[in-house]
Amino acid sequence: MEKPLSYQLLISTNREVAPAIEALQKLEADAIDLNMGCPARSVGRLGAGFALMEQPENVRRIVAEARKGTPLPLTAKIRLGVELDEQALKDFCTMLEDEGIDMLSVHARLKKETFARRPRWEWIARIKEWLKIPVVANGGIFTVQDAKDCLHVCGADGLMLGRGAVIKPWLFAEIARELYGCDVVEPAVFLPVVYGNFTDLVNELFRPERRLGRLKKFTHYFARNYKFGHLLSSGIQSSKSMEQAKERAVIFFENNA
């Protein structure tokens, strides 16, 4: 199987940059992404994720150190901020560009806004006006129409899929074909096969102690493809092993063909 296209760093100080860059280059990473968009408390307590956006001078040092340490494409992901402050957001984004970020992904919500809140795609349009580097839009994209609407509003250079890609992994192919004119065959989707393929990949790519947790997270979203998907989700969430989860999934698919 081909290696991932990029690895992501969650770091909190510029002192952590050099060893992380060295490790990633040994892994033959294709790109390095600095995550400054994750609002999870567990990440924030470490000074990483969105917590970095609240420390712009620290971020400046981190990006400068990373840029100095690697010729690889260096990207970053952010949110819009703690509150809507156009000047602060502009200063932060232009600082990232000035220090050598090659591409910026923007999750179009504030720090404490939940997924239930409509993403503020129009703010990505403002960021596009400020920067010369490519800007990628993230947030609220679950269908081809969502992707079309997002691009219409913000004019982003590309799209980053989150939960929508977990619910419908074939969404990438649909968007590539219908919006970007890529020569991609229309995917023939059979949900049990998709789920089985994911399970096989989890077993192949993750350490044993992490496999069940990853499958549970995936199932939480993937189950939305079914009218009674909550039965699949609850069955997997209460499973004690990968074997038990697989058995319960097979029974669900047999009863929900």
Image (cartoon, helix red, strand yellow):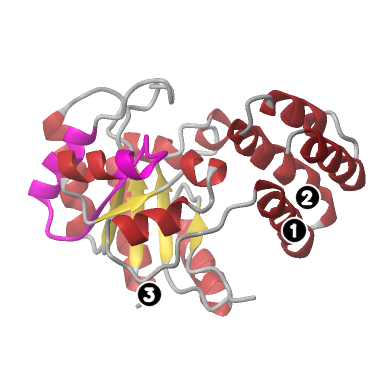
- For the residue labelled by badge 2, is the local secondary structure a helix, a strand or a loop? helix
Is 112 situated above or below 257? above
Question: Which x, y percent locates residue 28?
Answer: 53, 79
Amino acid bearing label 2? Arg
Q: Is there any visible trace of residue 14 in the rendered image?
A: no
Disc with the residue nearer the chain's start (1 vs 3):
3
Q: Magenta residues?
A: 121-147
Mark 3, residue position: 72
Quadrant for the N terminus, please.
Answer: bottom right
Q: Do residues under tags 1 and 2 come within 8 Å of each other at their CB atoms? A: yes
Is 252 situated above or below 202? above
- Residue that appears at 14% across and 41% down: 125
Of circles 3 and 2, the one toward us is 2
- Residue that appears at 32% across and 24% down: 118
Q: Is residue 123 magenta?
A: yes
Mark 1, residue position: 206
Q: Is there any visible trace of residue 130 in the rendered image?
A: yes
- For the residue labelled by badge 1, is the local secondary structure a helix, a strand or a loop? loop
- For the residue labelled by badge 3, is the local secondary structure a helix, a strand or a loop? loop
Question: Which x, y percent locates residue 156?
Answer: 21, 50
Mark 3 residue crowding within 10 angstroms, few (<14) / some (14–19) / many (20+): some
Question: Which x, y percent locates residue 172?
Answer: 43, 55
Of residues 137 and 23, the one nearer the viewer is 137
Mark 2, residue position: 211
Left or right: where 184 falls relative to 41: left
Mark 1 residue crowding within 10 angstroms, few (<14) / some (14–19) / many (20+): few
Left or right: where 207 falls relative to 240: left
Amino acid bearing label 1? Phe
Q: Is residue 242 magenta?
A: no
